Image: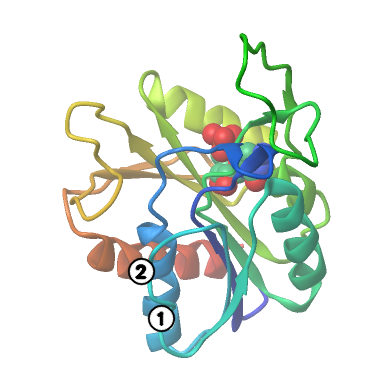
Amino acid sequence: MAIVKKLLITAGPTREHLDPVRFITNLSSGRMGYTLAGVAAAKGYQVSLVSGPTHLKVPRGVQYYPVISSHEMKRVCSKLFPSHDGLIMTAAVCDYMPSTTDRHKRSSIGGLTLKLKRTPDILADLSKRKGDRIVIGFCLETRSLVQRAKEKVRQKNLDGIVANFYSPRKQVPFGDNKVRAILIDRDMKVIREPMQNKTSLSWRILRWMEKLNHER
Ligand code: C5P
């Protein structure tokens, strides 16, 4: 067990541009990652926050690295990861990006069929060389939440994952809403958290991470 002092936290959505003014993104507000970063700093961790575009204020005491795209997030995270003891990947990295990006604004005359390609899986890539670092992922699903979350723990070589069920009607867990998360560790132990706000969930996630680290 290595003591976790320096935490790398990612947050927000990424933007995958198809031209200078148009992009693919998702509903992530960034609030979970920013709250987690603020709580971790208050708890005494040295925190680096790598974030896609959001409207949020950077929490006090946090080293901030703004990025736009998945490739940029990967570049910054790969550079920072070796000097950190743990990674918590709350970012909603876009899974797809346009297969080509135009340098100039595309004409809006006529139809458009977009060809997409996969973005790099930052979390899976970093956890391949995690050494004794602790690595926690996040996931959001509209069905088969626990099953899919468990698959991700295995596929991405994680110590744990925070799984959120997405309710389109209430837009939970995006924005300010309270969330009901499920914590799943590498032994597939499932902890169903009660409904709570993101500050209290952040304290809970950090205590859980410390316990997982202690048990290694
Ligand atoms: O999108 P998915 O459900 O696979 O996301 C699970 C975890 O993987 C999240 O922690 C997310 O930040 C990370 N991820 C990533 N790179 C991607 C897609 C997801 O690091 N291209």
User: Is residue 34 toward the left or the right of residue 51 in the image?
Assistant: left
Real-space Cα separation, disc 1 to disc 2, in angstroms: 8 Å
Q: Secondary structure at mark 2?
A: helix
Q: Considering the numbered disc 1 on the image, is that residue within a helix, a strand or a loop?
A: loop
Q: Position of residue 122 (x, y in %)?
A: 72, 47
Closer-to-camera residue (119/154): 119
Q: Specify few, some or many for label 2: CA neighbours under 10 Å numbering under 14, 14-19, or 20 or more.
A: many
The quadrant of the rendering that contains the C terminus is bottom right
Label 2 CB, ligand 1: below 8 Å?
no
> Disc 1, disc 2: CB below 8 Å?
yes
Q: In screen coordinates, is 60 left or right of 180?
A: right
Quadrant where the N terminus is found in the figure: bottom right
Question: Is residue 43 in view?
Answer: no
Picture quarter containing residue 182? top left
The residue that appears at 72% across and 28% down in the rendered structure is 98
Q: Is the residue 35 above or below the residue 113 in the image?
A: below
Three-letter code for the amino acid on which mark 1 is drawn: Pro
> Disc 1 vs disc 2: which is toward the camera?
1
Vertical comparison of 124 with 54: above or below:
above
- Residue 71 lies, in percent from the top left, at 76, 49
Circle number at residue 104: none
Q: Residue at x 39, y 64 (%)?
A: 55
Find residue 35 and name its label: 2
Q: Which colour style is shown? A: rainbow
User: Taking 189 as reference, is 166 left or right?
Assistant: left
* Residue that label 1 marks: 59
